[in-house]
């Protein structure tokens, strides 16, 4: 059991293996059950929470999402940013290494501006794992960059249906509505993103601009 020295041991472990992600994942999985990391996440101590969030970023699953969503509203900015990063990484894990590789290949194609190829790869992800929200979210991004607005909206909605906490999909939907000139719909989508994650400063500023308050 990890009690008073649990956090310090976790910090040492993460520092010692910082350069070897795979080994760190193995050690974390072996030594720190999810329930322990969740207990740290709710400890109220910023350094402890950040360490727990960083560990969950590597090995956490869907069971960690509610506590990480709560942490997005913590008073400590480091905690909020660590929780956001952990959520993105958890949402990018399907539970199947081959599907995760396809998703990452698609992301690389997006970075290379090979949008049509990225759509094809994300479609493969969706066909292999139709309940995996991130496949739809990433394809929505690709469609957005291709200015395929209706397809992007469709995939944002699918991602949200599968993952109602996906603030990124809500924000993406807002971006599409702006492009379509649907300002009220854009504001509503942005507001939903901010309700989940109030740290999206760019989205908050967009709402103010659309309202004429900025």
Image (cartoon, rainbow, N blue to C red):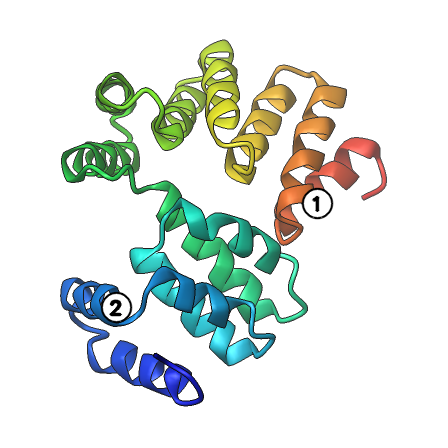
Front-lying residue, 177 or 44: 44
Q: Residue at x 42, y 23 (%)?
A: 140
Q: Is residue 126 left or right of residue 187?
A: left
State the image coordinates of residue 69 (x, y, percent, origin top left). Answer: 56, 51
Q: Which residue is mark 1?
A: 204
> Residue 139 location in percent, x, y?
36, 24
| Residue 28: numbered disc | 2
Q: Is residue 28 left or right of residue 4?
A: left
Q: Residue furthest top?
A: 150
Question: Mark number for residue 19?
Answer: none
Q: Residues within 10 Å of mark 1 (few under 14, many from 20)?
A: some
Note whether 92 is above or below 201 in the view shown.
Answer: above
Which residue is at the front of the view, 158 or 212? 158
Quadrant of residue 72 in the image? Answer: bottom right
Q: Estimate the x, y position of residue 202 in percent, counting from the top left.
A: 63, 46
Which residue does the image show at 31% across and 69% down from the upper left? 32
Quadrant of the rendering where the C terminus is positioned:
top right
Secondary structure under tag 1 reads: helix
Q: Are marks 1 and 2 in contact (CB under 8 Å)?
A: no
| Snapshot quadrant of residue 124 | top left
As drawn, which residue projects farthest toward the right?
213
- Quarter of the image with the N terminus is bottom left
Q: Secondary structure at mark 2?
A: helix
**Disc 2 crowd, CA 10 A, few/some/many (<14, 14-19, 20+):** many
**First-in-chain label (1 vs 2):** 2
**Where's residue 190, x and y in %?**
67, 34
Q: Nearer the viewer, residue 49 or 137?
A: 49
């Amino acid at each position: 059991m990890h009690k008073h020295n649990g956090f310090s041991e976790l910090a040492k472990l993460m520092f010692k293996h910082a350069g070897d992600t795979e080994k760190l994942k193995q050690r974390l999985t072996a030594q720190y059950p999810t329930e322990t990391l969740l207990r740290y996440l709710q400890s109220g101590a910023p350094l402890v929470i950040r360490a727990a969030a960083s560990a969950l970023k590597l090995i956490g699953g869907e069971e960690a999402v509610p506590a990480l969503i709560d942490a997005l509203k913590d008073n400590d900015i480091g905690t909020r940013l660590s929780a956001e990063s952990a959520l993105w990484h958890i949402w990018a894990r399907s539970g199947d290494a081959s599907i995760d590789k396809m998703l990452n290949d698609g992301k690389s194609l997006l970075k290379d501006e090979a949008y049509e190829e990225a759509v094809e790869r994300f479609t493969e992800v969706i066909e292999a794992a139709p309940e995996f929200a991130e496949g739809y979210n990433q394809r929505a991004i690709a469609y957005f960059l291709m200015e395929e607005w209706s397809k992007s909206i469709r995939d944002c909605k699918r991602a949200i249906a599968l993952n109602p906490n996906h603030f990124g999909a809500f924000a993406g939907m807002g971006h599409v509505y702006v492009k379509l000139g649907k300002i009220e719909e854009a504001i509503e989508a942005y507001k939903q993103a901010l309700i989940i994650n109030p740290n999206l400063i760019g989205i908050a500023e967009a709402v103010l601009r659309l309202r004429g308050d900025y």
